[in-house]
Amino acid sequence: MDAELEPLTDALMRIMTGDDWGRLIDDASFYNVSPLVQLRTRLLVRSRESPQLAREGLLSALRTTRNDAPDLLAEIVRLVGALHGGIPASRDGLVDNAVSGGTFHAPVIQASTVNGGQHTYYGQPPYSSLPPITAWPRLNAADPIALGVRLARRLPGESPLPHYVERDCDPELSHRVLEAAGAGGLVLVTGAPLSGRTRTAWGALTGNLPGTTRVFAPSAGTDLRGLPALLRKRAAGGCVLWLDNLEGHLGEHGLTPAVLASLVHFVVPVIATMDDEAYEARRFGTADRARVLDGIRAVELNRVWSDSELQRLEAQDEDARLRSARLWCGPHTVPEYLAVGPDLVEEWRRASRRDRHPRGHLLVRAAVDLIRCGVPDGGISSEVLREAQKFYPDEFALAEVESFDDGLAWAAKQRDGVSGLLVPGDKEGTWSVFGALLADAIDRPDDLPVPLDLWTFALGTVRTKGARWTVRSNAHVYLVDRAEDDPMAAAALGDINVIVGDLETAELWCRRAADAGHTEAAATAGALLAARDAEAEAIPYLEQAAEAGIVRSQYLLGMLLANQAQSWLARAAEAGHPAAADALPPLRKVTDTPPDTVKA
């Protein structure tokens, strides 16, 4: 019984351990790739122990395949024969085929003499085994992500996909889907990469067909020739064939004109998507031309959204992801933002490790935080980034394994043909960030808070009064709640308001921080109070700061106390006290020089 398997084993073993393995697997039917890979893996593992043991294991596997999976064995025979021009002779000598009588089907394996009867040997099956229609998911239970719709960013409590925004082509697309549902036919949506064609096609499918419709979404390369026979046996109920990236389903085993004609006969619509370039190559090209596309008028989706589409986007204010897309997509399209954003955020989050790109990760975080502070988007220079990174001491120490230039280059490298993590700014040498990174930071403010000292640094990088007040306003948004329990945050708010000139608000926050024990805030609070002649209120804060060793507070406190001393000595001198009169002149020399009360 093994005479026909011996030469097949030897030939297959040479292929699996040689240069022809790639050619064999490329030519294999899609559904047989996995078992072939498993066969090879076991062969390679056994080969480490003994080539003879490996050969015996492969022969044993082929025996099992002959009994349990004859279709797979026929595939192996076909593949080996195509590479070697037929199956070689057995190990024990040449075996001549002699066949007489009967009827034979498919390739004949060398097995010496076969007489009479009807004989069917293993050959390539006419089509692959397809799942029964009852196993196809219903439309209202199908997973759009599994069927090709790109995953958008998702926070806890959010649906898997954001609300669908109607595209300008939707009325025409809906009409064609309904028409195909009633008469069969191919409905094709084309568009540039990341134009949203799969999401648009999915919206047309779910918006126009009943939820009970069975959806068959085969993997690329699946043999579709068995569909007509499968549909012939179906019970009542609608079905649809979903072919995302149709170019992966063309060819003699895919969606051919004959298969499409059968689907039309059974009134099964085909909803498909295709990249613009792939469609044009297979519709108008020569070498890759696909006849099934002849006469098809595709629904073309524009990459750039029209004004009416953007207006419909603005109306979707209840979805945070769409709001973020509208606010932060920048020069990119909304589908690009929604599709690429999750990948960029995840790549950035994982890059902080020492063996990845800790410098690049740090520079992106600094850029995100500066924009959160209010530094104009697109106006962050490389030098500002170089200084800003120092406000993250732990990350800055870890980033020493990667140079500034290397980290910047990694962060700016374009991904998916769309964007880098850092995006070139308005002027040469300036940067912004891809909007999804900023949106993610805004929606998770407690995850990565802005360092407190970065707020005052950000104030120093902006040049206009309006920009400074933007930073001040953003600081209040982020820090007011935190400042209720955190004297460091209250002190930061005080410093920010001093810089922009809102001294009344600065005094409020500095006093709150000082009352919680913040000595620097006590120094500023005392100076602000002294500047508006509230000396009695200033002195306790100045004493708090002076006792902590803050020199400017020691000086100011001394001057205030000297002024008070002068006032009382003057009263005593007027009343005739001689010692008070003697003490006044030297004291006046000190107090006649007004102190600087507020440190800018």
Image: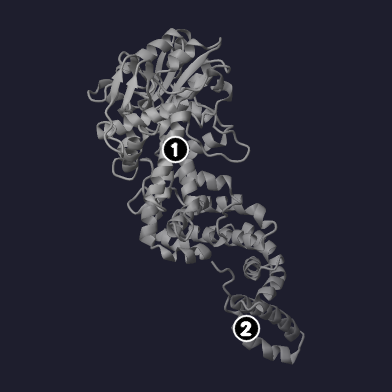
Q: Looking at this rendering, what residue extends furthest in the left direction?
A: 286
Coordinates of residue 180 in the picture (x, y in percent): 44, 11
* Kind of element beneath mark 1: helix
For residue 35, above or below residue 262? below
Amino acid carrying mark 2 in the image: Arg
Q: Nearer the viewer, residue 505 or 409?
A: 409
For residue 419, above or below residue 302? below
Please tell me the numbered disc located at residue 371: none
Which of discs 1 and 2 lies nearer the camera? The answer is 1
Residue 420 appears in view: no
Q: Nearer the viewer, residue 552 or 338?
A: 338
Please tell me the numbered disc located at residue 61: 1
Q: Nearer the viewer, residue 291 or 519?
A: 291
For residue 522, above or below residue 64? below
Q: In which quadrant of the rendered image does the N terminus lie?
A: top left
Relative to 339, 289 lies left or right: left
CA distance for labels 1 and 2:
108 Å
Coordinates of residue 597 in the picture (x, y in percent): 59, 71
Q: Could you classify mark 1 by the number of other residues whose Cα lies within 10 Å: few (under 14), some (14-19), or many (20 or more)?
A: some
Question: At 58% across and 75% down in the image, what residue appears?
Answer: 595
Coordinates of residue 12 in the picture (x, y in percent): 34, 38
Decide: marks 1, 2 in contact (CB < 8 A)? no
* Kind of element beneath mark 2: helix
Question: At 45% across and 49% down in the image, what residue appears?
Answer: 376
Q: Could you classify mark 2 by the number of other residues whose Cα lies within 10 Å: few (under 14), some (14-19), or many (20 or more)?
A: few
Amino acid carrying mark 1 in the image: Ala
Q: Nearer the viewer, residue 431 or 134?
A: 134
Q: Which residue, given by chain and number where applicable, does mark 2 sit on? A: 588
Relative to 206, 299 lies left or right: left
Relative to 66, 554 lies left or right: right
For residue 481, above or below residue 322? below
